[in-house]
Each structure stands twice: as structure tokens, then as C-alpha cells.
Image (cartoon, rainbow, N blue to C red):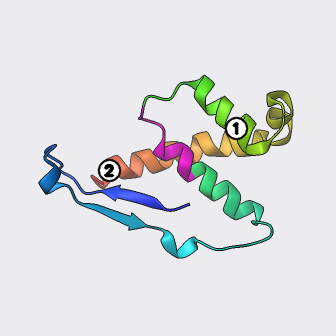
Amino acid sequence: ICHFLLHLPFTGREDELKISVIDLHRAQIRAKVPRRWRDKDLIGLYFSSMNIGLTQRDIWRFMKVYFGMPLRDIYRLEIDLLKKARIKAGKIEARTIRKNL
């Protein structure tokens, strides 16, 4: 996963649009991604998708496809990740607002 950073303020004019690719240094090819990195990327993806109009149903649909298992199993096996994602995304959001990013 890499992230795109939209430089603000953005007036809506295409000729003034400035976007940077960030976190690309983490791109790797591995047989198995360590859980810590997987969780970090999923939490970052969750934060990035918080204000784009996705519904809770959309998020659960993604989780079902990503993990390849029924939702009840995801909820049982990944409850710590789900809790951590909400908490961490809230902290990232607060930091983003505080630092005016």
C-alpha cells in the first residue's frame, strides 16, 4: 500500500493540483506479510477511507473479501484489529486536524 497526499489548500482547479506519493518505501514482495505490517496498512487504509462516503456495510464487504471468510469469523478472529483500527484512526484524525495536514 502507498498513500497519496493531497496538498492543501486545493482550490478545485486541476492546474493547481499537487499530489505526492508517500510511504512507497514500504512496498515489498513477500511470501507472507508480518501481522504488524498488515494491521498497520489496514488501519491506514481505514483512516484514509473514513470521510469518502463509505458505509459500514461497504467496510464489512471489504473485510469479507480481504480476509476471505464469513463476517462472524472475522469478528471473532480479528476483534483486536477492529478495536485497534477505530482507536488508532481517531488518533490519526486528531493529529491531522491539530497539525492542519
Quadrant where the C terminus sits is: bottom left
Disc number placed over residue 63 in the picture, else none: 1
Q: Observer-nearest residue: 4 or 91? A: 4
Instruction: Find numbered disc 1 in the image and state the secondary structure of the residue it sits on.
Output: helix
At x 13%, y 45%, the residue is 11
The residue wearing badge 2 is 98
Where residue 86 sits: x, y (%)?
59, 39
Query: What range is drawn magenta here?
Result: 44-52
Amino acid beneath label 2: Arg
Image quarter of residue 80 = top right
Q: Of the two numbered discs 1 and 2 on the same chain, state the one appearing first in sequence.
A: 1
Describe residue 92's horizontal placement relative to residue 32 as left or right. left
At x 67%, y 30%, the residue is 60
Amino acid beneath label 1: Met
Q: Is residue 47 magenta?
A: yes
Q: Residues within 10 Å of mark 1 (few under 14, many from 20)?
A: some
- Residue at the far front: name it: 14
Quadrant where the N terminus sits is: bottom right
